[in-house]
Image (spheres, rainbow, N blue to C red):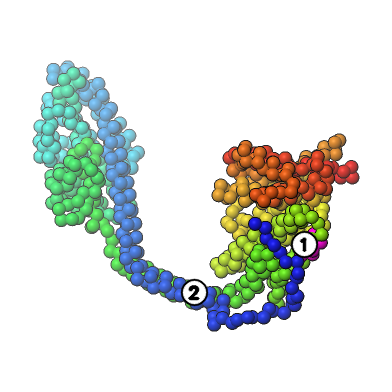
Amino acid sequence: MKTEFSPHRKEHTKTVPHKFYRLKLTFTQKIILVTSALTLAMALLITLSLWQLSSDVFSKLERELLIRNVDSVHSQLNTSLETAQNLTTQITRSPSLAVLSALEPAPSETRSEAATQLTNTLNTVISTSAASKTSSIQFINIYLKNGSVYGSLSPESLPYQDFEACVSAMKACGISDLDGYVPTCWFDFVSFQGNGSSGRCLVGMRFLYKASTLEKIGVIVVGLKQSSLEHIFKNLPSRIFMVRRDGTVISATHSSHVGETISYMEELLAYDSSGSSPIALLPDGSEVFLYRLSGGASWLICPIEENMLDRDSTVSQYTEKAIYFTLAAVALTIFLSWFSSKTLTKSLIRLKGVVQRVYEGDLSARFQTDQHDEIAYLGVKINDMLEQVENFYKTQERDATEKQNLELQLMQSQINPHLLYNTLNSALWIIRQKDTEKAEDLILSLGNFFKLALSKGNQEVPLSNEIGMIQYYLKIQNLGRGKSFHLEDQVPEEWRSLRILRLTLQPLVENAVIHGFSNYRDDGQVTISVQADKGRHALTICVEDNGIGILPEDLDILMEDLNTYPPTKEHKHYGLYNVEHRIRNKYGRQYGLALESEVGDFTRVTLNLPLSSQE
């Protein structure tokens, strides 16, 4: 459906139009009232819900932090225990140990040499572990089944005197089923003093086996320094316990808890057997983190409720500050709403009304204001363009009906009321959002765009003008609609002064934005390049986009429409059509547009133009 315009221009003056009615509330007052009401409502909602919301958030964050801390301790502790175990593996492979543990006694010289080699091996392992902050070994003792004892610490300094004493100690601590293979068990925490050293160590034991029968021939007792565990726990404020099967605490974040008994260990072990989650729920409703450590003889336990901080004071302070900030925001919002609405929206609303009337077909609409800002400047330029459009309409009334409709569509595309209306709407909302710098940039870009589009009525303009208008058009799209379209300008400097028909490139770029990028991508790129053949006096300007492309069957229909004159009622490509036929009317039918496209890749429009010898 074509829009009919009245050729009769209404008289207008420079004064403010008569007000046919007066509202009880002005637009500025409405903005202030609505904004203030919304802000107050938000303040009330925040006040009523902030306590519960902040409490839940803090609780969730604190719980997540606790889970990560406990997971980290569990991982580091397992790594420390496994590293200490791996360091003792070379002892089990020592040939001297095989000699000393043999049931048949070897010659005394052989045993003496083997004992010396074994002692050297033990010292090497201990010195090697000293470089590790989390796996530093204090002592290693070996108790053989044949009654021999070897190690870095005197047996009198430990509660384990021989092989049988070690087995008994493991059974007493709840480690059962010792008949088969038993991994390294970390199950005790002992104090010692002797051989010039003293301290407390986490004790682990691993059996020595006869290779052919897996018969137990001895046990290695390893003491891990207390400082190694303290290094793991030192940055953790939570209460965490390392507990053996009978509930005795053998290590903790606070040394005062060592030796205490966990009363609910039986319930935890029953839960651990289900193996579903690291969080165990006790019969009284409390939750406990439960991790089984390397070797399977001890567990890492962290009571959740005991480690959750008292959040009431923190939440109260947070809520109080939030209320203060909200009240300050209400006052500031009322002031800024009044100030910005009064100073910025007056001219813009009038200009929007003019554009709306033009969009509806009234070319007699004129912008009138007593302001002297960028919006007023834009309004004056729009008035000038409307004057030219109206005069053009009167001139073209003498032409044939179909040609008149075609040229009218051309002028409508020059003014592009859709672009005006949508851009001014965007500017209005940006101003309401208090981003006046962005709104000013948008309005200036729109004014410069129409200034170049007008070009003082010249039909031919420098190629640089067309490129500049495209840049302003893309900037308007980016600022007003949140896009990030980009122009790749590959035009050499020597061809930028080349004169071409006005508004031949911009409609192609607009077509790419509307049909190539819309609902497909927000960061499209348009590339403009120029090639000249001075020998054939031919010039080609290429406009390419990386949009969605055109289906082959649709491309065939489009090319058929471009070659149809006059255009049919179903015609939808007035921008391309006007460019094509203006070029043909100006230079001849051998010139015009060529289209190429790949779906999902690109669309390329090539303008074939003549090149004069002067150019």
Residue ID for mark 1? 393
Does residue 234 appear in the picture of this structure? no
| Residue 68 located left or right of residue 379 | left
Question: Could you tell me residue 507's position as x and y percent?
Answer: 70, 51
How crowded pointer 2 is (Cα within 10 Å; few <14, some 14-19, many 20+) is rated as few
| Residue 474 located left or right of residue 149 | right
| Quadrant of res 88 | top left
Give the Cα separation between the discs numbered 1 and 2: 44 Å
Residue visible at 81% across and 57% down in the picture:
399
Residue ID for mark 2? 34
Question: Could you tell me residue 202's position as x and y percent?
Answer: 22, 42
Between residue 140 and residue 399, name the one nearer to us.
Answer: 399
* Three-letter amino acid code of the residue under disc 2: Val
Residue visible at 61% across and 48% down in the picture:
515
Question: Could you tell me residue 299's position as x and y percent?
Answer: 21, 44
Number of residue marks: 2
Q: What stretch is highlighted in magenta?
A: 388-396
Of tags 1 and 2, which is closer to the observer? 1
Mark 1 or mark 2: whose residue is earlier in sequence: 2
| Quadrant of res 490 | top right
Q: Residue furthest right?
A: 614
Which secondary structure lies at badge 1?
helix
Between residue 523 and residue 292, name the one nearer to us.
Answer: 523
* Three-letter amino acid code of the residue under disc 1: Tyr
Does residue 385 appear in the picture of this structure? yes
Q: Main secondary structure of the magenta part?
A: helix
Is residue 298 on the magenta stretch? no
Query: Taking 23 as reference, is 208 above or below it?
Result: above
Residue visible at 58% across and 50% down in the picture:
518
Between residue 85 and residue 497, name the one nearer to us.
Answer: 497
Query: Taking 53 as reference, is 165 above or below it?
Result: above
Quadrant where the N terminus is found in the figure: bottom right
